[in-house]
Amino acid sequence: MAANSTAANNMAPLPVVLIGCGRVAEKHLKAISKLKGLALKAVVDVNPDSAKRLLSSVKGFSDVKIFNDYKEAIDEIKPAIVSVTVPSGLHYQIAKYAMEHGSNLLLEKPMTMSVSEAREIYELSQKTGLKVAMGHIYRYLPIVGLVREDIAEGKYGKVTHGTIYVRWGHGEDYYSSAAWRGTWKSDGGALMNQTIHAIDLLVWLMGSEPEQAQAMIAKRIRNIEAEDLGMAVLKLENGALAQIEGTTATIPSKHTAEFSVFCENGQLSMGLDSGKPHLNILSVKPDGKTKKLNGYYIRKQFKKGGLFSYKCALNPHLGIYKDLFDSIVENKAPIADAYAGFSSVDTLLGIYKSAKEGRPVDLPLKDNFTSTDMTGFFN
């Protein structure tokens, strides 16, 4: 490890190309600016004004090249990392081209909009050895990984069930700001866009892959093609159940997300409420009394990750980029890797398939299913 650290300190910064200059791209720039091991060489967007506006929003990127064609940028720069922040329906073609030309990926969620395309990107990562870091931001929040390790090691006994709700309200102005938002082809609805990384986190914390999904979706308020409300139950391979609620049909000024995992000897609840994090970790002692472990995990995280870990709470993309850099240098899997990307897409599309067919659906899906297979669902 020391040798790898020394090598990382002595190596030239890894060149990065960022494709897509929309809302989330600024978080990418802020993360890259904090890491000496990375150097942003180019940004790509079909609208040059968007690219210029993005580069002016963060100091230190005045000499970065602007392209309107991602293939030209990749061919010229030959980046070690390609970061993909375009609409979800374009992820597959860009990710495939980048990997076929030797680039590692930071890929915003969802990985793709079809099971077969997600599987292909995962298999391409396995074949080439290139790293794929998914934008499943919740895995990179402080304390989450430590709790997962303890759950996996049996500290809290058998996992019984888990729950999440993501009430991430968006008004009509959000959806009308871009024609692709809320469409089955390019975006999906509240589950695919706003909830997929929460589903990823819940399954990851519970330590078992989904084997069955049962779901219902609805369009209650928002004038979009896809759902603004979805509810599902997953059965995991270890027998545990996971309950999911995702919606954008709530108050836009009050975004809330809550994750809970219940075990025979403890429980974890954590989340965000209007940008403010909260945490409650309890264990059950042999005498039946409960003990709160928040302080224990905070101290343990600070000792392990120091101040850097808590900076990731303000911008989880900082953690994703740092982890991807370490994964490339040390040749290890990222925390949210290519398999996580494939599995979350397979699970989410299984949820959609269950809603469409009105029955439980086995996972992983045996046949291909795409978001466009939902076209006309609400007609």
Image (cartoon, grey):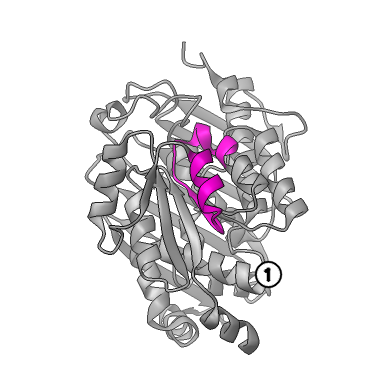
The amino acid type found where label 1 is placed reads Asn
The N terminus sits in image quarter: bottom right
Tag 1, which secondary structure? loop
Q: Nearer the viewer, residue 376 or 88?
A: 88
Write the residue at 29% across / 40% down. Answer: 50
Asked whether 320 falls inside the magenta stretch, the response is: no
Residue visible at 39% across and 30% down in the picture = 228
Q: Which residues are magenta?
A: 70-94
Q: Nearer the viewer, residue 255 or 318?
A: 318
Question: On the picture, is 94 further left or further right than 274?
Answer: right
Residue placed at 26% from the left, 59% from the top? Answer: 58
Q: Residues within 10 Å of mark 1 (few under 14, many from 20)?
A: some
Image spot of residue 203 (x, y percent): 60, 54
Total labels: the figure holds 1
Q: Position of residue 235 (x, y in %)?
A: 67, 45
Does 137 appear above or below 222? Answer: below
Residue 273 makes an appearance in the image: yes
Q: Is residue 73 magenta?
A: yes
Q: Position of residue 180 (x, y in %)?
A: 40, 27
Question: In x, y percent, where is residue 270?
Answer: 42, 63
| Residue that extends furthest to the front in the rendered view of this protein | 76
Nearest the eye: 208 or 18: 18
Above or below for 256 versus 223: below
226 left or right, relative to 256 = right
Residue drawn 43% across and 86% down?
Answer: 299
Residue identified by numbered label 1:
331
